[in-house]
Image (spheres, coloured by chain):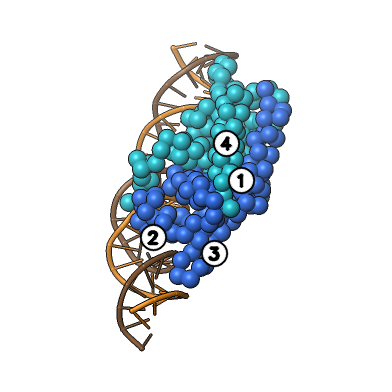
Chain colours: A blue, B cyan, C brown, D orange
Amino acid sequence: MGITKSQIFNDQQNQLAGIFRVLSNPARIAILEYIGSKKACICNDIVEEIGLAQPTISQHLKELKSIQLIEGEIEGKKICYCINLNRWNEIQDFLNEFFNNTKTNCC
Amino acid sequence: MGITKSQIFNDQQNQLAGIFRVLSNPARIAILEYIGSKKACICNDIVEEIGLAQPTISQHLKELKSIQLIEGEIEGKKICYCINLNRWNEIQDFLNEFFNNTKTNCC
DNA sequence: TATTAATATCGTAATATTGCGATATACAAA
DNA sequence: TTTGTATATCGCAATATTACGATATTAATA
């Protein structure tokens, strides 16, 4: 096996797991913290900041973009990344809803 | 490669990623929701509820226990699981801190 | 139009995760 | 003490993830 049986779970469960999966890598956490630490969008000094190879960073950025946590704006031959604040809050709310609902009836 | 280079990240980043990793599987989300839905600790009808084999569930429970999200109490030949509410809230706070801090300066 | 710089994609090796059958363990009840 | 039930562990196959070198793509600039 090795394949997650997502068919047997509902959308909310699969979506939660998907979001958690994207966030489950320290490089991606570090990238988000770095992007978030800048007042404006930052261009790709991320590679130097994080200390992983450029293709690796590129792949991580792709994962973060896949759930719209960040956005990249093309600016000449550079790309400026910033946090998508609406989506950021939406995801935070979604996770809090999970945490709050799950503990409501427990114990 | 294939190994996450956790040495180059700090504790907070690795801990966050570790928590997100445990939560990144829909079966584990479903297990948490099921355990949380009961007023009291529940014993292992989890296997029938979730629809995965018993060894698989046992492994998922072990992962959830590894970050103390749930606790198992031995009761005869059964084991009763419940959410560890203190730890649950602690993790929720830790994640919110990450979400709030990261978006503070951004954009 | 070449060159250079920034970023993305491809291919691949190393490792991790998921799931389960077989089996071990622990304990209650016969 | 044997039997049955609940749970854990082992070992393995299938698949996913991480990382990176090589290479492609894109766009500004010489």
Type of residue at label 1?
Answer: Leu
Determine the secondary structure under disc 3: strand
- Indicate the position of residue C10 as horizontal and vertical percent values: 39, 69
Q: Is residue A68 left or right of residue B11?
A: right
In terms of image quadrants, where is residue B82?
top right
Residue A70 position (above or below residue B12): below
At 70% from the left and 35% from the top, the residue drawn is: A101
- Indicate the position of residue A49 as horizontal and vertical percent values: 39, 50
The chain identifier of the residue carrying mark 3 reads: A
Q: Say which residue label 2 marks.
A: A55
- The alpha-carbon separation of the residues under discs 3 and 2 comes to 18 Å
- The alpha-carbon separation of the residues under discs 4 and 1 comes to 19 Å
- Indicate the position of residue B60 as horizontal and vertical percent values: 52, 36
At 35% from the left and 56% from the top, the residue drawn is: A53
The chain identifier of the residue carrying mark 1 reads: A
Q: Which of labels 1 and 2 is toward the front?
A: 2
Residue A5 position (above or below residue B38): below
State the residue in front, A26 or B58: A26
**Same chain shared by disc 4 and disc 3:** no
For marks 1 and 2 on the same chain, the one whose residue lies earlier in the sequence? 1
Q: Is residue B33 left or right of residue D10?
A: right
Q: Say which residue label 4 marks.
A: B97
- The alpha-carbon separation of the residues under discs 1 and 2 comes to 27 Å
Disc 3 to disc 2: CB gap under 8 Å: no
Residue A10 visible in image: no
